[in-house]
Image (cartoon, coloured by chain):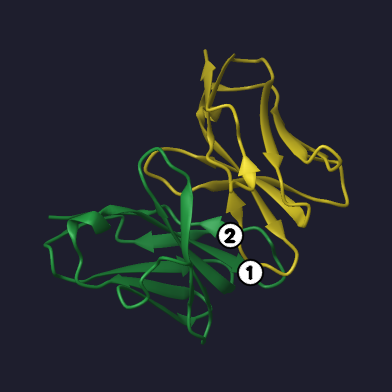
Amino acid sequence: DQQVKQNSPSLSVQEGRISILNCDYTNSMFDYFLWYKKYPAEGPTFLISISSIKDKNEDGRFTVFLNKSAKHLSLHIVPSQPGDSAVYFCAASEGGSEKLVFGKGMKLTVNP
Amino acid sequence: GAVVSQHPSRVICKSGTSVKIECRSLDFQATTMFWYRQFPKQSLMLMATSNEGSKATYEQGVEKDKFLINHASLTLSTLTVTSAHPEDSSFYICSARGFGRREQYFGPGTRLTVT
């Protein structure tokens, strides 16, 4: 049973436009959500996180939105740059648990 | 800040031998470290969680006698793959989490190839 779902395996956008990456979850006990970026043969890089007490968190070009009622979060990257091309993982954790539950990832390609 | 290193980045070993992978948090104290395995085109699979000075907690299906984890200090954890077999060939990634933090910071990974 997959608790964190990234239903779109890939996304392709033009440089300068907005990239929107989506993530759904099923466990209502999740209270902290994270996005990671990963290049091939490298470890994931932490991008941004959000607590369930918020509905938006922004850091530079990256904004994460959380819709608790829909159990949905999204990562907006604007403007997108070719260097953003990577696999993006959504992850979630439950208060009291040390573990992160990861989605399967989504490959973003930003075309020059 | 929040840099995690892993060594070696790549290792090739013969079947039946043991391999040790080191994970270090360089600029923070890691109260908890995690070991993951990634199969091609798949997500990260958590293998075990370790807290400094205590035994690691292994995920279901992970053989603790095969994958030995030691978290000797607040900046170092090691994973030893014992009696390696070709099916152990994979990309192993560690992560570390600081006290009171919920985000994990990942190392660059180690590519293990068992021949």
Q: Is residue B72 left or right of residue A91?
A: left
Amino acid at circle 1: Gly
Residue A59 can be seen, yes or no: no
Q: Residue B2's mark?
A: 2
**Percent x, y for residue A37?**
55, 40
Q: Secondary structure at mark 1?
A: strand
Q: Secondary structure at mark 2?
A: loop
Q: Image point 20% across, 71% down: which residue?
A: B18
Chain painted in green in the figure:
B
Tell me whether circle 1 and circle 2 mark residues in contact (CB < 8 Å). yes
**Percent x, y for residue A42?**
41, 45
Determine the colour of chain A.
yellow
Query: Alpha-carbon neighbours of circle 2 within 10 Å: few (<14), some, or many (≥20)?
Result: some
Q: Nearer the viewer, residue B18 or B9?
A: B18
Residue bearing the label numbered 1: B98
Q: Nearer the viewer, residue A112 or B62?
A: B62
Q: Is residue B98 above or below residue A57?
A: below
Q: Is residue A20 left or right of residue B73?
A: right
Q: Is residue B97 left or right of residue B15?
A: right
Q: CA distance from mark 1 to mark 2?
A: 9 Å
**Percent x, y for residue A95?**
75, 64
Q: Are marks 1 and 2 on the same chain?
A: yes
Amino acid at circle 2: Ala
Rendering quarter of residue A99: bottom right
**Percent x, y for residue B79?**
36, 71
